[in-house]
Amino acid sequence: MRMQLKLIIILAFVSSVLYAQTDSENAKFTESDNDNIKKVEIDFFAGYYEQDGEHSAVEGGIGSQKLNALESFLFIHVVTDSVNSFNVNLGIDAYTSASSDKIDKYTSSASYISSASSSDVRPNFNLKYSRKIKNHTISPKFSFSHEFDVTSVSAGLDYSFSFNNDNTELALGFDYFYDTWLLIYPAELRHRPEYTYQGSGGDDDRYGTDVRKTGALSFSYSQVLTKRIQMSFLLDYVSQNGILYTPFHRVYFDDGIPQDYEELKTVEAEFLPRQRYKVPIGLRLNWFVTDFMVANFYYRYYYDSFELYGNTYDASLAFKIGSSFVLKPFYRYYNQSASMYFAPYGKTKMGSEFYTSDYDLSKFTSQKYGLGIKFSPVFGIARMKFPSKRRLTVLKSIELRYANYSRSDGLNANILSFLLSIKY
């Protein structure tokens, strides 16, 4: 379930990146000499996600993965002058997953943890300040989020340097995440000493905590090759230590007991190493084919210390229709190997040191395809000028996007999203 929720967040984030395009020619603004703020841009994003499948990690690799989620965020970009700017992102996610809420499936009545895991709301906040002096930009940032079993705080710093008449850019970034996890184990295991929080005095309504620390370094090199082609090389290194598994994911062992007698099979909570590193390497190409069509291509190779390898192939087009509409078809293909620690339901060998039946760590291929349509007239959709201000507020654009995501293990998802952009 945790990996599924991360997938929702990642998909929404990718959508927001694809949407966040600044069109400086859409409107002209009259600025007052007394105004300190020169420009404010506001994006409102809303997305709906639904999925289904038959490999729930909570049930050890079997059972429904049905999940529904709503996400929304307000992104505010404030330019105070030619040097300083701020980005503020206020978001909230809400999901329901009653059919996969099986943390307490063997108990006679659900606890408060069971009801919390079947639905949850995750508020999140991101703040980034950027200061640009000549060709150098430095950007400290901070974020916070909270859900029923995880509280996350992060801080970071981005730096970029452009040269060669702004045709070349080098960028470096560092992020540090500190996540605090509530140790919620499957109900039938909580009486065992290894799953009992010693400070609780045996009270199963209280749980211990553990932490996950993540450090991420990023590097990118962007180059304008011709008037119509731009290339970017991307490299990241991610190091994690602490709790790298989800406590309420079950793993059933190969102990000779048939699947029909699940309640008798040997079961443990998922357990993985406390250290992991990840290395993704990417290449992006943007090609302005004509004045009315732009093509974007992306490839990424991924490797991590869990012996998981992955390849991502992504292509999208943007067709300008008339002066106001843009059509954006896209396609993404991904394949990965299985982690050395993965085994399906009932196939984990007795005595294994580390184990998981989470199909996000299995071997699979996936596809995502869809279409976006953007309505963005040259002078905006609507314009309003307040009598007390010498400024215009312009509704810049509206965009709708649909995507279908499917995996070879049977997981299927639909994503519908909406973006509204305003400039002040």
Image (cartoon, rainbow, N blue to C red):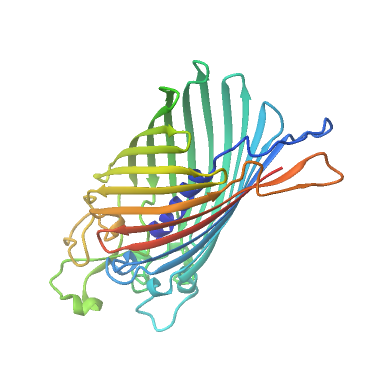
Residue drawn 35% across and 48% down? 331
Q: In this rendering, is residue 8 above or below 315?
A: below
Toward the top, the furthest residue is: 164
Q: In this rendering, is residue 42 above or below 122?
A: above
Q: Quadrant of residue 220?
A: top left
Q: Position of residue 176 (x, y in %)?
A: 48, 39
Toward the right, the furthest residue is: 388
Q: Quadrant of residue 130?
A: top right
Residue drawn 29% across and 48% down? 334
Question: Could you tell me which quadrant the C terminus lies in?
Answer: top right
Toward the left, the furthest residue is: 256
Q: Position of residue 273 (x, y in %)?
A: 30, 49
Observer-nearest of 112 and 95 = 95
Judge whether residue 259 can be spotted in this image. yes
Toward the bottom, the furthest residue is: 108
Judge whether residue 123 can be spotted in this image. no
| Relative to 222, 307 lies left or right | left
Q: In this rendering, is residue 256 above or below 394?
A: below
Q: Position of residue 388 (x, y in %)?
A: 87, 44
